[in-house]
Amino acid sequence: MAAVRRRLTALLASFGLAFWGTGPGAVGADADGCAPLTVPDELGLVCRTDRTGQGEILVVEPEGGTFRALSRLTLRELDPEVDRLAWSEPEAWLERQMVVDVGALSAALDEVGGDPDSPFGSEMVKNGIAMLVDGLEELSRLPLSACGGAATEEEIDCRFGIEPFLLFMRVSLVARYEARFAFNIRTFNEQRLRHFTAIANSFEAKSPDP
């Protein structure tokens, strides 16, 4: 039923019957918190809207569990002034987005390694986590050598670390009418990466007012 409500809300929004924000093509949230995205209930994900220094962002993340903090997808509408490179030089803009949230990742990894019930509780794995955290703390952003090549006009895809502690980061730039939107995906789980990618591909933006 929740999925049906989300699709119905998206349909109503296309006729201007739901609140989506203040600007043309603005992102927003419905009662489920997931519009304008389709998030299947069976994936165990929840949506919320956060206000940050970059404005309002839509966050999709696991509903619970020890590993919740390690995976998230965010969506935000870009500012034509602050993010002007997204319009004029999209590849350069994407490369600048490979920023590691070191504090949050370090805390989450430490929690996973310190959980006595975690499958990652062995000394060898704890040492691997510690090495990854140390490596991340030395960086302000992922090196482009971790990205398997230069960004395209629409996406940059990076991996950092070694198995089984491989951080996947993907930033996608989506053009809708004159607006630009950015998806940021961060996860250590390749299956969750596929989930987030499918959710990002479901994106529907409200058409601008005539």
Image (spheres, rainbow, N blue to C red):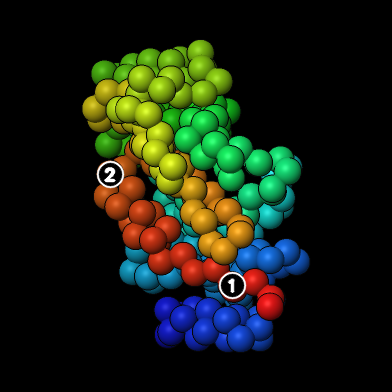
Tell me where residue 79 appears, x and y as whole percent: 69, 48
* Relative height, residue 126 to residue 189 (above, below): above
* Any part of residue 66 in sight: no
**Residue at label 1?**
206
Q: Residues within 10 Å of mark 1 (few under 14, many from 20)?
A: many
| Quarter of the view holding residue 20 | bottom right
Nearest the viewer among 101 and 125 is 101
Q: Nearer the viewer, residue 165 or 155?
A: 155
Where in the figure is residue 68, as x and y percent of width and height? 45, 47
Residue positioned 59% across, 72% down in the render: 206
Label 2: element kind = helix
The residue singled out by tag 2 in the image is 190
> Is residue 34 shown above or below 152?
below
Q: Is residue 30 visible?
A: yes
Separation of marks 1 and 2 at Cα, in angstroms: 30 Å
User: Looking at numbered disc 1 in the image, what kind of residue is underneath it?
Assistant: Lys
Q: Is residue 186 above or below residue 101?
A: below
Left or right relative to 182: residue 170: left
Q: Amino acid at mark 2?
A: Glu
Q: Quadrant of the N terminus?
A: bottom left
Rendering quarter of residue 130: top left
Q: Quadrant of the C terminus?
A: bottom right
Q: Residue at x 24, y 27 (%)?
A: 163
Residue 190 lies in what quarter of the image?
top left
For the point 34% across and 60% down, the residue is: 198
